[in-house]
Image (spheres, helix red, strand yellow):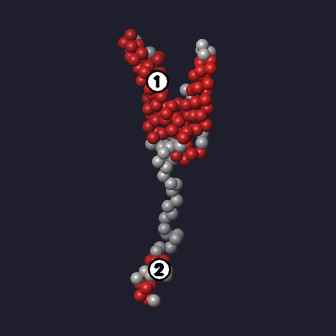
Amino acid sequence: MAAGRAAGGGDGADACLAPPSWQTPRMTSAPVRRIPPAGLLLFLGYAFVVLGAIGLSLRWVVDQAISAPVSLPGIVAMVLLAYTIFTITMVLQRKQAARGLAIGLATLTIPAVPLLLLGPVPAMAIAPAILGIALFLGLGRRSVRDWLSEP
């Protein structure tokens, strides 16, 4: 019987060698989730569409820059480009500050609704309205706050 205890026979010998429970660190971290929540996936898709729209408008901005080096549309396009790239980078790095930046970028859907309502086909305002509501609801979920956990 004593030989079984010395060889670690499973009857409590390992408990004598282990440190007391108050000395062992607790590993209570949340499980690592590899895929972002649906709200962030929707936001990332939206952000890449915004990047595409900026890319398509750059030809017009460059044409304006030939006649006037500094123009309001050029400044707006460059600021929006920098803001969008920075926000996407922060979201991919899972930073907490990315949630506020993402909500700020989602506010671009707000002026699109009245502009389309005043246009020739008011029914087109439904798309940005639904997208904006989905973005705000998706970014407000608890799973998004948990996923964006890096300080």
Q: Quadrant of the N terminus?
A: bottom left
Q: Label 1 amino acid? A: Ala
Question: Seen from this angle, which residue lies furthest left?
Answer: 66
Residue at point 52% right, 35% down? Answer: 43
Report crowding for label 1: few under 14, some 14 to 19, many 20 or more residues within 10 A (C-alpha): few
Q: Which residue is mark 1?
A: 53
Q: Amino acid at mark 2?
A: Gly
Q: Height in image: 115 above or below 143?
A: above
Q: Residue 72 appears at what percent x and percent y?
A: 47, 17
Between disc 1 and disc 2, whose residue precedes?
A: 2
Seen as rendered, the residue at the extreme bottom is: 1
Q: Is residue 103 above or below residue 28?
A: above
Residue 91's spot in the image, x, y percent? 48, 39
Q: Which quadrant of the figure has residue 141?
A: top right
Q: Which x, y percent locates residue 13?
A: 46, 81
Give neighbour class at mark 2: few <14, some 14-19, many 20+ (Cα, 10 Å).
few
Q: CA distance from mark 1 to mark 2?
A: 66 Å
Q: How far across and how far down the image is residue 98, in percent? A: 50, 39
Left or right side of 10 for 110: right
Q: Is residue 125 above or below residue 142?
A: above
Which labelled disc corresponds to residue 36? none
Q: Which residue is mark 2?
A: 10
Residue at 46%, 77% (x, y): give it. Answer: 14
Residue beneath the point at 44% across and 15% down: 71
Q: Quick check: 72 left or right of 122?
A: left
Disc 1 element? helix
- Determine contact: label 1, label 2, CB under 8 Å: no
Residue at the limit of the structure toward the top, as seen here: 67
Residue at horizontal 46 percent and vertical 39 percent from the top: 90
